[in-house]
Image: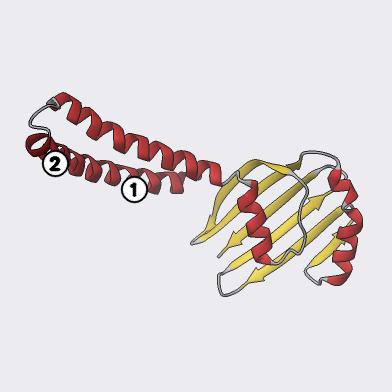
Amino acid sequence: MSEIQLFFWGINAAIIFVVLFIVLIIALWVVNKWILKGKIRQLNRILISIGIPLMLIGWDYYSTNRSFYSSSNMDKLLDGIGAGITLPPYEITNYKNEHVMADDFKDTYQMVFKDANIKSTISTLDSVCSANENWEKRGDEYIFNSSNYEKEFNDSLIIRPNKGTATFVRYMW
């Protein structure tokens, strides 16, 4: 996550913690007073009211952070922009979100293919380059460029089969 995203996530987490803490303190007090007839000590109610929001915030942070590195999310993204190919197994090794200027952002994903299957897709990439105008070949690189003016996205996928790497860049303006 970038610093800006982390800042807003932190504000959101603080609000969620305070609201859940208050709601749980009141709910546990009501349950303890009228249903359980005072069987839960006050310290335990406070610990439960602190623990549950912290677990939810930790889970949210983990899932948010891991979603950037999810190959299934990347596959859906590539399918959504119309790349027209399915990549062999890969791992996203680096994610970077940059603030370019004003309200423009750039997401960069670095991918490494898990085995040498990417070299077997060179013929597929060559045929896609000749059939689809969004694809082109520059030297040893296969480049897909797509712009969605309604969503204000410019997407680029650069595949380097001989090196076993790829880069996906989404520019948002």
- Quadrant for residue 37, please give it: top left
Q: Residue at x 72, y 50 (%)?
A: 167
Against 129, is 117 above or below?
Answer: above
Callout 1: SS? helix
Count of marks placed on residues = 2
Crowding at mark 2 (Cα within 10 Å: few <14, some 14-19, many 20+): some
The residue drawn where x is 56% and y is 75% is 150
Q: Amino acid at mark 2?
A: Ile
In the figure, is residue 45 to the left or right of 96? left
- Colour convention of the picture: secondary structure
| Among numbered discs 1 and 2, the one appearing first in the sequence | 1
Which residue is disc 1 drawn over? Answer: 12
- Residue that mark 2 sits on: 26
Badge 1 crowding class, 10 Å Cα cut-off, few under 14, some 14 to 19, many 20 or more, is: few
Comparing 173 with 38, the one in front is: 38
Q: Is residue 154 left or right of residue 61?
A: right
- Going by the numbered disc 1, the residue's amino acid type is Asn
The residue closer to the viewer here, 126 or 5, is 126
Q: Residue at x 42, y 43 (%)?
A: 60
> Residue 28 is drawn in which quadrant?
top left
